[in-house]
Every structure is written in C-alpha cells, then in structure tokens.
C-alpha cells in the first residue's frame, strides 16, 4: 500500500481546515467600523451660579465655523470626521444638536480635537456675519446678545484648536451600541475676568480675555447613546 497517496489528500484537507479556522479567528470580534455621532450643546449648569453678578442680560445667537473634528486613539492613531466650513448655530435653550456622524474604526479613543477657524475665503460662507470687510479671512465665531441693555455682536477671527480628553476613553467595538461624543460648552464665564468681574464684549480691550475664556469653556465626553436610553428607562422605572 502506498501511504504517500493516502497522506496527500489528508494533508490538503487538514491545511484547508487550518486556513478556514484561521480566517474565522482573525475576523472574530472585528465587526468593522462603527457609526459615531458628534453632538453639542450649551450648558450653563456647572458654573452659572458662580457668576451671578455678571450683567450680561442675554445671548441671542452663538455660532462658529468648524473646520476639523478628530478622534485620537490610545495607540496614537486618529480618525477624522469629514467636515469643512461647517457653521454651527447652537440652540440657546440647551438643546442637543448633532454636528455630524461617520464610521470610525474600532478601538479606544481618549482625546477629541476640534478646530474652529475662519475661512480662508470668506466669500464662500453663506452668512454675512462671518465676513470681514476688506479681508478675505473673515471671522471664526460670532456671538450676539445684550450687555447692560445694549446690543452687542462679539466677533473673532482667532483660530481655536481645542483638545479635550475623554475620560474614560470612548470604546468603539462590536458590542458598543451607538457610540457618540458629546461636547458641552459653558458660556457662563465668557464675559468675566479671573475675579468674576464682568467684561464688556463691546470693549476691544477685553477681546483677548474673552477669547481665552471661550476656548476654556469646551468640554467633551464619550458614551453610548443606548446606555443613556437605558438609564433614562431606569429613571422612569424608579419614578413609578
């Protein structure tokens, strides 16, 4: 009996099984990219009480120009959201808005970056508030309201590169439901100095301090929208 003729088909079959099993193992636990939403809201709950003496009567409009959104992973890889010249007009009642959503590779992400920049060619922006007469660069942020009963429009051409840590990191995996990044902006400290004294947004001398306050007012957290829904359901059950 020729044993080589017997072992040859068995060897081929065993090799095929190894290849198939290896492919299954390589693909297990990897369900591809997940759709991640980026959401934003104005939230004054955290520091509003600290600045009760501020004489800023009201905000009537807050909008800015987003050029880039990026998630950075714990392994230093990054994932960009495709946005350019995105005008964000924030609801003043604290409602949450979704800026964008995109498929992001699986992994753990511990930092979120956002670039608010003026447009290099402001004539392409369909909002005259962002256009700076005699200058193609235009403005990056526009804030309207009233201060001591006088209307103001605070505009800045400053570029803001805002880096926000996600703690704990945002997990994007096969088991994550609807991952999202929530950006909270607290405007309560925009128009005050380090001692809590009010700053007149109409006074150009206050511009640099106000810009610094704005940059510090951004905070981000990662989460799972499905978990938030479950928590809401649990709260409802507790109320019953």
Image (cartoon, rainbow, N blue to C red):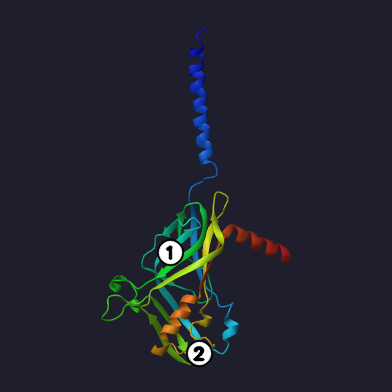
Res. 202 visible in picture: no
Residue at mark 1 to residue at mark 2: CA–CA distance: 32 Å
Q: Is residue 81 left or right of residue 167?
A: left
**Of callouts 1 and 2, the N-terminal one:** 1
Residue 223, x across and y down, in percent = 57, 61
Q: Which mark is residue 69?
A: 1
* Contact, mark 1 vs mark 2 (Cβ under 8 Å): no
Q: Please tell me how crowded label 2 is: few (under 14), some (14-19), or many (20+) other residues with Cα within 10 Å.
A: some
Badge 2 element: loop
Q: Is residue 122 left or right of residue 176?
A: left
Determine which quarter of the picture holds residue 169: bottom right
Residue 240, x across and y down, in percent = 74, 65
Exactly how many numbered labels are in the figure?
2
Determine which quarter of the picture holds residue 131: bottom left
Q: Is residue 4 left or right of residue 125?
A: right
Badge 1 element: strand
Residue situated in front as seen by the camera: 62 or 78: 78
Res. 166 visible in picture: yes
Residue 16, x across and y down, in percent = 49, 27
Residue farthest top in this picture = 1
What residue did someone put label 2 on? Answer: 198
Residue 110's place in the image compared with 133, above or below, is above
Residue at 50%, 9% in the rendered image: 2
Residue 194, x across and y down, in percent = 52, 86
Residue at 68%, 64% in the rendered image: 236
Q: Please tell me how crowded label 1 is: few (under 14), some (14-19), or many (20+) other residues with Cα within 10 Å.
A: many
Q: Which mark is residue 125?
A: none
Residue 208's place in the image compared with 75, above or below, is below
């Amino acid at each position: 009996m020729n044993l080589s003729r017997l072992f040859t088909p068995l060897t081929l079959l065993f090799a095929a099984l190894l290849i198939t099993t290896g492919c299954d193992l390589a693909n297990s636990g990897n369900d591809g990219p997940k759709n991640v939403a980026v959401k934003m809201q104005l939230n004054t709950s955290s520091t509003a009480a600290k600045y009760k003496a501020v004489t800023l009567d009201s905000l009537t409009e807050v909008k800015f120009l987003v050029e880039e959104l990026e998630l950075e992973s714990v392994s230093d890889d990054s994932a960009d959201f495709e946005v350019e010249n995105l005008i964000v007009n924030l609801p003043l009642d604290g409602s949450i808005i979704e800026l964008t959503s995109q498929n992001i590779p699986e992994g753990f992400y511990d930092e979120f970056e956002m670039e608010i920049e003026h447009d290099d060619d402001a004539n392409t922006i369909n909002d005259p508030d962002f256009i700076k007469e005699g200058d193609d660069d235009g403005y990056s942020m526009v804030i309207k309201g009233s201060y001591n009963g006088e209307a103001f429009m605070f505009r800045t051409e400053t570029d803001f590169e805002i880096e926000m840590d996600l703690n704990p990191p945002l997990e994007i995996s096969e088991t994550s439901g609807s991952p999202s990044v929530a950006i909270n902006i607290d405007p309560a400290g925009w128009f005050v100095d380090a001692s809590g004294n009010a700053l007149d947004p109409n006074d150009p001398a206050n511009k640099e301090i106000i810009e610094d306050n704005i940059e510090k007012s951004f905070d981000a957290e990662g989460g799972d929208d499905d978990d938030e829904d479950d928590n809401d359901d649990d709260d409802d059950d507790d109320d019953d």
